[in-house]
Amino acid sequence: MFDVEGRIACVTGASSGLGRAAATFLAERGARVVGVARRSEQLADWEQECPGQTATVTADLGVLDEIADAAKKISGPFGAPDILINAAGVNTREVADDVTQEGWHRTIDLNLSAPFFLAQALVPQMKQRGWGRIVNFASLQSRRALPGGIAYGASKGGVEQLTRAMAEAWSASGIIVNALAPGFFPTELTGPVFADDALSARHARQTCIGRNGELSDLEGPLLFLCSDACAYVTGQVLFVDGGFTAK
């Protein structure tokens, strides 16, 4: 029920952070994984370190015109993906009074538009197979407003609704669409948070469990959403946040 061995998975944002952790975990579980990111050197490092069958595609998905070409390259090494993990993201951390159009559009394009258009390009092959799994990455800021997060929060609020809309559009064809909403995990993106000991401790106290996340905490939820175990669960956002949003 929780088996992904032999499945073909595409993971965006695989060069670092949660995307890299997700790509590595799926490869360890026997999936054939194509990692996608714009930083080729970091991608190469991941592929070298990662066990199992892996391949990489260098692309800046924030440039929407590159997505169609990236989708073709993604299907090259192993065939069209069964599983798509939309983990690539950016957070400019501009406060509302300082938000620029450039930062706003970059955030919306990468965090919200790219997951849809990449999925749209890969869905036809999933439909042919009658099986697919799409996992978007939402956020605490899908529902909570945090300082300096107006563009990021808008994009991640959009991801929550996008997930429901994608599920409505495609689940009847066997394509299950859900989202993970991580709490605070130590990654490159959250570096400024964990660099501030007081802030990091405050976030830990906000959880019900009493600590911030560890990358291994995402493995079980991710495996659930990528496997047959979630066959009747679609259009949902699973908060993996230690109970942060429960308080």
Image (tube, grey):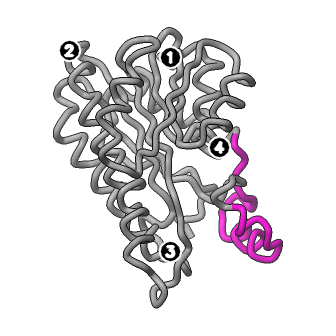
Q: Element at badge 4?
A: loop
C-beta proximity under 8 Å, tags 2 and 3? no
C-beta proximity under 8 Å, tags 2 and 4? no
Give x and y (percent) for residue 208.
66, 62
Circle 4 residue: 16
Front-lying residue, 161 or 229? 161
The correct choice, above or below, for 46 with respect to 6 in the image is below
Q: Residue at x 62, y 39 (%)?
A: 15
Of pointers 2 and 4, the one earlier in the residue sequence:
4
Q: Element at badge 3?
A: loop
Of pointers 3 and 1, the one earlier in the residue sequence:
1
Q: How far separated are the C-alphas under marks 3 and 1?
A: 35 Å
The correct choice, above or below, for 48 with respect to 89 in the image is above
Give x and y (percent) for residue 228.
40, 20
How packed mark 2 is, by other alpha carbons closer than 10 Å (few <14, some 14-19, many 20 or more), is few
Q: Quadrant of the C terminus?
A: bottom right
Q: How far separated are the C-alphas under marks 2 and 1?
A: 19 Å
Picture quarter containing residue 28?
A: top right
Circle 2 residue: 128
- The magenta-colored residue range is 191-215
Q: How far separated are the C-alphas under marks 2 and 3?
A: 39 Å
Is label 2 or label 1 in front? 2
Of pointers 2 and 3, the one earlier in the residue sequence:
2
Of pointers 1 and 4, the one earlier in the residue sequence:
1
Circle 1 residue: 4
Q: Residue 197 in magenta?
A: yes
Q: Residue at x 25, y 13 (%)?
A: 129
Q: Element at badge 1?
A: loop
Is label 3 or label 1 in front? 3
C-beta proximity under 8 Å, tags 1 and 4? no
